[in-house]
Image (cartoon, coloured by chain):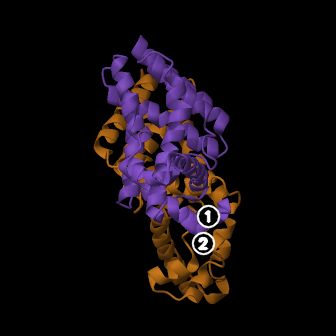
Chain colours: A purple, B orange
């Protein structure tokens, strides 16, 4: 379980209170999850700064007060959106790869799952977009972004260590770099060539580990 | 000379007409260049979408009509800003490295110059920020961004070919990837470790070429 997948205090606090009954809470949580899926895609296109409660309510044809019941502020919505993007990443990349043995086979499965899903977010790499937007804005939104990316790099490093890498941090950094570059090149119209280069780079890095 | 460094038709067209006299044109060009330097830093923080003529005029304490004399529209301002960012990159990275012989020494000099100047734009990597913002917005702004990034990758590939790389495109992609990743990690608080990893990766890639 990586940090980005665990519900945080603010996620738990934002769920409707238990006094409303389990049935209603279940529906509230499903509505909240559906709102956040849409918010993740919108933010991947327009950034987290464009993600206001008014903008999202208009997009979902919900009332602003209905959205306020789920998210008390723009900042809370932004943090919840970052966490929902992390859960989507976990479902699409970490969970499928978990079937592979830890170490080099897990790294290969993670890279394959990542490179197969460059379409994971509607507007291209969610993480590249929101990191570029928030890297110079200290606060809970930036903290949530940093935690999610660090968690991804940390998992790569952990698997590289299990694979016996002499410098697991270096292997993790290079795997992270080629996956990120494939993603950004894909969005700029050079996806096929970039995917080939990225897969070759991953294989070379893993061959070094396995050799 | 890479494409990003050459003045384009729209840049020439935006300069005041020659009939105004050489003295005034010189001043107009200096003013325009100073405006664009500020626009590049603003866009690296807030993105190109936040870069309106009104916003930039307020920041520079100029009149909007004064700015309109230099840039007829927000889009023209955005394209000119992308081109100015390309010239800044050329001055800081391409020109210093040009002293090194072409091939592997040039690639090493380019990577060293790039990694020494992760502070080149006020708000972190200008290219990462604007590419994430515009990758899904077809038009002249996206075209200018793609041309500049392709030009950088093209120069890396050209030098890798001169260095005798079996697959110059792959070497260029990997160099591009580790430099970009060092840049984004630097902005998220892990700069020192990322720089070490990036320099090690560059050395390994070049050792493969030179070995």
In front of the other: A65 or A147? A65
Considering every residue shown, the one lying at the far right of the view is B139
Residue at image point 57% right, 64% down = A66
| Residue labelled with disc 2 | B77
Q: Position of residue B67 (x, y in %)?
A: 57, 83
Rendered view: B12 above or below B107: below
Circle 1 residue: A57
- Whether residue A160 sits left or right of residue A196 in the image: it is left
Q: Where, quadrant-wise, is the C terminus of chain A in this rendering?
A: top left
Q: How far apart are marks 1 and 2 (CA)?
A: 32 Å
* Image coordinates for residue B54, horizontal then vertical, percent: 55, 81
Q: Is residue A20 visible?
A: yes
Residue B186, relative to residue B211: is it above or below? Answer: below
**Circle 1 sits in a helix, a strand or a loop, which is it?**
helix
Judged from the image, the secondary structure of the residue bearing numbered disc 2 is: helix
Residue B163 visible in the picture: no
* Location of residue B100 (image quadrant): top left
Callout 1: chain:
A
Q: Do labels 1 and 2 share a chain?
A: no
Foreground of the two, A192 or B171: A192
Residue at 39% in and 23% down: A159
Q: Position of residue A83 (x, y in %)?
A: 46, 47
Picture disc at residue A117: none
């Amino acid at each position: 379980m990586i940090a980005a997948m665990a519900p945080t205090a603010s996620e738990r606090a934002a769920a409707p209170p238990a006094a409303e009954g389990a049935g209603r809470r279940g529906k509230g949580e499903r509505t909240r999850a559906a709102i956040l899926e849409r918010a993740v895609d919108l933010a991947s296109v327009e950034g987290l700064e464009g993600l206001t409660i008014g903008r999202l309510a208009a997009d979902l044809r919900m009332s602003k007060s209905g959205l306020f019941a789920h998210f008390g502020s723009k900042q809370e919505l932004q943090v919840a959106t970052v966490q929902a993007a992390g859960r989507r990443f976990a479902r699409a990349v970490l969970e499928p790869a978990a079937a592979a043995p830890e170490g080099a086979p897990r790294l290969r499965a993670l890279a394959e799952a990542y490179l197969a899903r460059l379409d994971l977010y509607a507007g291209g790499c969610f993480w590249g977009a929101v990191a570029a937007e928030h890297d110079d804005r200290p606060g809970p939104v930036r903290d949530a972004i940093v935690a999610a990316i660090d968690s991804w790099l940390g998992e790569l490093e952990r698997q590289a260590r299990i694979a016996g890498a002499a410098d697991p941090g270096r292997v993790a950094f290079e795997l992270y770099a080629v996956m990120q570059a494939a993603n950004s090149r894909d969005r700029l119209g050079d996806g096929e060539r970039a995917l080939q280069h990225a897969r070759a780079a991953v294989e070379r890095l893993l061959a070094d580990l396995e050799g």
